[in-house]
Amino acid sequence: MKQIQYDGFELEHFDNAKSFRNYQVSLIKKYLKGNFLEVGAGKGGLALQYYKNLDKLTLIEPDKKLFRILKNKFDKKNTKIFNKFIKDINDKFDTIIYFDVIEHIKNDLLEIKNASKKLKKNGHLILNVPAFQFFYSDFDKSVGHFKRYNKKDFYKLSKKSGLRLEKIYYYDSIGYILLLISKIFSFKQTNLKNKVFFWNMLIPISKILDKLIFNCIGKSLLCVFVKG
């Protein structure tokens, strides 16, 4: 697994998108239980939304700068924080999540296999990724994304990893529409802060539209594997 290098600006903007973060947490609410691990927790923007619902939480972050930020934010008795990779963790977990992390890892299959080894029987591996390769842009490349994903990618990963695919769906249809407009008109990725602010305001509409169109499209893709 290649160590991810961030300037941190994009994490700040997306962590400040509270409506989107709340939407993401609502999608994994049923899995917030038992011994829980988030891989590549960044600055903890997502974890801040869910950690109070857990009795036991582990966060791992391979980037040393981000690791130090996490340590300052989550100095709690029920939270363990490591500057490690998942292959170096000794514990077993009921749920492991990778939120916007797998796309930064070139050998995603190896990473998923390593995660599977750390799951308890009937444990869940949750992966959230940017959707649709045709949206791959200079911005993706600049923040270290190797690719964007579709459902077929996870069907293949399920077969190769031995994990059963329990649930998979796209979400954030408004985000999809905004990306499509940007691609059609070749808008450059400038003023990211303002763009994220505007997009975040539209998330309530996105949540409604996602249901109306049965999650057939979306800016993001959520996949849940289970270990048999």
Image (spheres, rainbow, N blue to C red):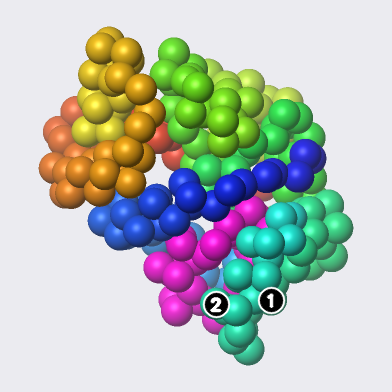
Residue 110: tell me if it is visible: yes
Q: Residue at x 72, y 29 (%)?
A: 106
Magenta stretch holds residue 39 = yes
Counting from the top left corner in percent of width and height, residue 183 is at 32, 15
Counting from the top left corner in percent of width and height, residue 132 is at 44, 20
Q: Nearer the viewer, residue 101 or 26?
A: 101
Task: Report which residue position mark 1 lands on.
Answer: 80
Quadrant where the N terminus sits is: top right
Q: Residue at x 76, y 45 (%)?
A: 3
Q: Amino acid at mark 2?
A: Lys
Please tell me how crowded label 2 is: few (under 14), some (14-19), or many (20+) other residues with Cα within 10 Å: few
Could you say which quadrant of the image residue 175 lies in?
A: top left
Q: Nearer the viewer, residue 226 or 178?
A: 178
- Using the image, determine if residue 120 lies above or below residue 141: below
Q: Nearer the viewer, residue 69 or 76?
A: 69
For marks 1 and 2 on the same chain, the one whose residue lies earlier in the sequence: 2
Range shown magenta: 37-61
Q: Is residue 135 left or right of residue 97?
A: left
Residue 120: tell me if it is visible: no
Q: Is residue 79 left or right of residue 62?
A: left
- Using the image, determine if residue 173 lies above or below residue 24: above
Q: Residue at x 20, y 43 (%)?
A: 198
* Tag of residue 73: 2
Please tell me how crowded label 1 is: few (under 14), some (14-19), or many (20+) other residues with Cα within 10 Å: some
Q: Is residue 192 left or right of residue 178?
A: right
Q: CA distance from mark 1 to mark 2?
A: 12 Å
Q: Amino acid at mark 1?
A: Lys
Query: Furthest-front residue in view?
Result: 191
Foreground disc of the pair 1, 2: 2
- Using the image, determine if residue 88 lies above or below residue 149: below
Magenta stretch holds residue 50 = yes
Q: Residue at x 71, y 40 (%)?
A: 112
